[in-house]
Amino acid sequence: MDTVDVAADLRREAIQVDERRLLVLAGDRDRGYDHLEAILEALSVPITGTTLVGPDDRLRCEQLPQSNVDSLLGTTRDVIALDAHDGLRPNALGKVVGAVDGGGLLVLLTPSFETWPDQRGGFAASLAVPPFDADDVTGRFVRRLVETLRAHRGIAIVDLERDRVVDDGLTDPAPRLATTVDTPSPPPDHRFPTATYEACRTADQIEAVAAVESLFDRERAAVLEADRGRGKSSAAGLAAGAFAAAGEDVLVTAPARRNARELFERARELCETLAEGRSVEAYCIETEAGGSVEFREPTAAVDECESADVVVVDEAAALPVATLESLLAASRITFATTIHGYEGAGRGFSVRFRDRLAESDHEVADCTLVEPIRYAAGDPVEVWAFRALALDARPPVDPLVADATPASVTYRQLEPEALLADERLLREAFGLLVLAHYRTEPNDLARLFDAPNLTARALLVDGHVVSVALLAREGGLSATTRARMYEGGRIRGNMLPDVLTSQLRDERAGEPTGIRVVRIATHHAARSRGLGSHLLEQVRAEVTGETSADADREPVDWLGTGFGATPGLVAFWRANGYATVHVSTTRNEASGEYSALMLTPTSDAGRALHDRHAEWFCRRFPAVVGDALDDLEPDVARALLRSVDASPTLSLSDHEWRVVAGAAYGPGLFDVDPGPFRRLVVRYFVDDPDGIELTAREERLFVLRALQGRDWEPVADRLAYHSTGQCMRALGDALCPLVDRYGTETARAVRDRFVDG
């Protein structure tokens, strides 16, 4: 067996057809590295074009651990070797595949295919969340991965244990006919130099450059979306160079400098073609016209974006939504992003940030690049990766589920073995999760198959998935584990008990057992029909035993959820019986929102957990919302307080009631003692009493001024009051019905004195 010949033949064919090929060295790790070294010595690949992804620096080339492969985004390699012997992270595999250039080779070093599914590496160990251990983690994801490696074309498999080539991976493609490629033509009335468009390699790139060219007008945004290898970064680079040649200052940002390398190379090439550019350094170009293209780290870019003429964000989906939203302060901005989620930040860009962009003042030009540039269309490694990681998973087409109603659907548990056996079912369920949630990523596919604490439930209509929920079992922790959590230890996979214990100092919180709804998604063609609520009803009925005759069913004390809080989402969960017990004091990096935790009890133990945390939430919220949450959106605050299931005590002294009633009905001032006002306002929101008809504007005034303590003038401006005086009077007027409802005899005496007077 000569693996060097196998690799050389693969590489030769890959170059011939401008595709990639994959070589698997399955067996002993050291033998695999021996073969890999021989292969790299024989192939005419420069060291700078080779990367080893693995735990050890065993080759004379760049080495990265799987946890750091984000740095490959926006770059290409001729050969990448991925060592999977200590475990394989699906996210890392996706990113690695995307970085292999046309004509390149991806090499996987794996255990033997027979033993690999039974091994538990680092990633698999992370799935063993308490109270489960490593023996409870399965190897279904790897088993499926092995099956795809055996089944797909363009993949060579070498069995190192038996010293034989199982598959040479050659596809023996038919010779391709020479085609005449038309010289790219710029669009009519273009404003970029003609050379900008002549540097484009596809019609898609021309459209992308033209979309960015529209940024010559103010308050514009361009969005370039594509799978990897379609030239979106190159198009953004050409446009950046053209702007610089016109004397504009272009600020470029990305998760890391390295991610923008292709963009700067194309910008530099164009400026040199136009005899305009000179490089000050690798990531800074200046032009004779006085323009520039310069990289800034994301944090610095947020601070400087308003002063730049044009901003370009590469690998946008890898940045937190909050950062992207802050960058909208730029008048003219371009976002270049990948569609199928190699970035590891999931679909925060397309699911969450797109809404922010649509609400902004920017007129948006969209462009999707389809034609591959980095490698030929139909590249077998891309086809394999999409299937192996479900990157192109999609929910069923609209007509198949368009008529679904709660009465016509079937509730079903999606067992991992059933998903393994039914590729269509898997693609529909996972595709729905991917499209509906900003955090779903390839790692979640492995969790769905192997994590012992995760299960999935779905509603099906005529066998097609119309709604799906991903559920995690949490709690049920031993006293030792709870103590470790209370003392600051990191306990994986128990998000709700962890927050309630470590942050809110409740050492008993991890004792009851609960089910957290990690994700829930309904097909867009069947939304607003109660399907999501119906799915949650079925989950509750199952865990409480209403639909199960299983006497051995493990009891569940609570159902819960945690999510980036928006008024609509809070209202949805509240309508389904969930109540707020906590809101985070920092924003979620991916969604840019504060996270809400909500519970609904299913036993006495769950009720006790919920009740004490609801009471504590009411008690601390007036202080927190004026401090760490002083930028919480008023409508989110209103929704959160209205979703609390508690009756907070309202203990104001006689003097405090005189202050409050005097500000409502007389000449008193809120500013002299805000504390009692805050407690009163929280009680009002939590009670949501009938008979008090305040407007949304008045309630927002309560949040902005009474709870968050924002200055009168900006509050008046935001709520469109003519003056601060009018705003102050409006607060007093809004307090009157609260004094009437909750006030003591002392408060009523103050009221009557001024009303009668």
Image (tube, grey):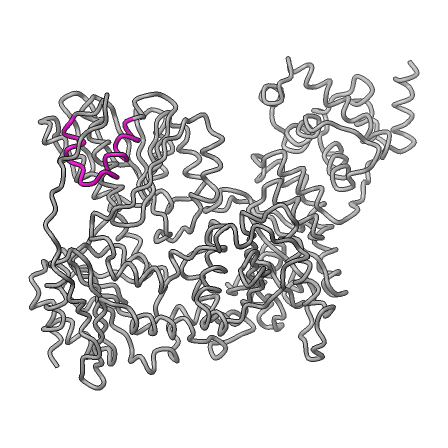
Residue 351 rendering spot, x and y as whole percentages: 47, 44
- Work out whether residue 541 or residue 717 is closer to the camera in this orientation and state it: 541
Residue 480 rendering spot, x and y as whole percentages: 59, 73
Q: Which residues are magenta?
A: 194-213
The majority secondary structure of the magenta stretch comes to helix
Quadrant where the N terminus sits is bottom left
Left of 648 or right of it: where is 380? left
- Residue 187, compared with residue 461, is above or below; it is above
Left of 160 or right of it: where is 598? right
- Work out whether residue 285 or residue 446 is closer to the camera in this orientation and state it: 446
At 53% from the left and 74% from the top, the residue drawn is 132
Left of 529 or right of it: where is 522? left
Residue 130 rendering spot, x and y as whole percentages: 54, 71
Within the magenta stretch, is there residue 725? no
Residue 370 rendering spot, x and y as whole percentages: 29, 45
- Residue 157, compared with residue 15, is above or below; it is below
- Residue 650, compared with residue 147, is above or below; it is above
Residue 62 position by quadrant: bottom left
At 48% from the left and 64% from the top, the residue drawn is 425
Residue 233 position by quadrant: top left
- Residue 714, compared with residue 461, is above or below; it is above
Left of 291 or right of it: where is 348? right
At 61% from the left and 70% from the top, the residue drawn is 477
Within the magenta stretch, is there residue 204? yes
At 59% from the left and 22% from the top, the residue drawn is 718
Quadrant where the C terminus sits is top right
Residue 627 position by quadrant: top right
